[in-house]
Image (cartoon, rainbow, N blue to C red):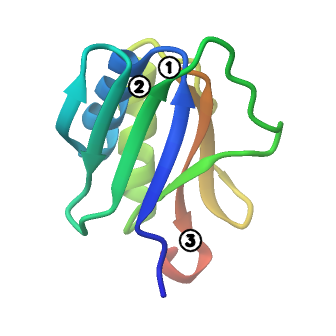
Amino acid sequence: MKVQHLNLTVTDVPAAQKFLETYFGLKCRGNRGDGFAVMNDEDDFILTLMKGREVSYPKTFHVGFPQENQEQVDKINQQMKEDGLDVNPPVHAHGYTFYVKAPGGFTVEVLCPSSKMN
């Protein structure tokens, strides 16, 4: 069994949607104004974004986007820096990874798992 759907409550649905489209290739399959969006990826994972006034996730909560290799992690990190996002360089931890606060109030991890590292 695999997880096939996740809902995130965010403070800014359009900004979160654009972030996920730009850096992770998710596609919007429908929305209702600026309060709700349905997105999915190439594996038909469904991510819904719902607007909330106050978004407060636990400190360690994050959504992960594994990459095929370290070069892809570096590429996304560099693109985010060039676009003005506040990101630190990737580090070797439980894989090759970095975290970024996404628009809308949630944290994203971009990583190359240890099993795929060069």
Residue 95 place in picture, x, y as percent: 64, 66
Secondary element type, mark 3? strand
Return the disc, 3 or 2, that comes first in the chain's sequence: 2
| Residue at which label 1 appears | 103
Pointer 1 with pointer 2, Cβ within 8 A: yes
Question: Foreground residue, 89 or 41?
Answer: 41
Q: Is residue 66 visible?
A: no
Q: Which mark is residue 65?
A: none
Question: Foreground residue, 75 or 46?
Answer: 46
Q: Is residue 57 visible?
A: yes
Disc 2 residue type (three-letter): Ala
Up the image or down, 118 lies above or below 94; here it is below
* Residue lying furthest front: 32
| Residue at which label 2 appears | 16
Q: Which mark is residue 113?
A: 3
Category of crowding for the residue at label 1, using alpha-carbon neighbours closer than 10 angstroms: few (below 14), some (14–19), many (at least 20): some
Give residue 24's quadrant in the image: top left
Q: Is residue 49 left or right of residue 63?
A: left
Return the disc, 3 or 1, that comes first in the chain's sequence: 1
Secondary element type, mark 2? helix
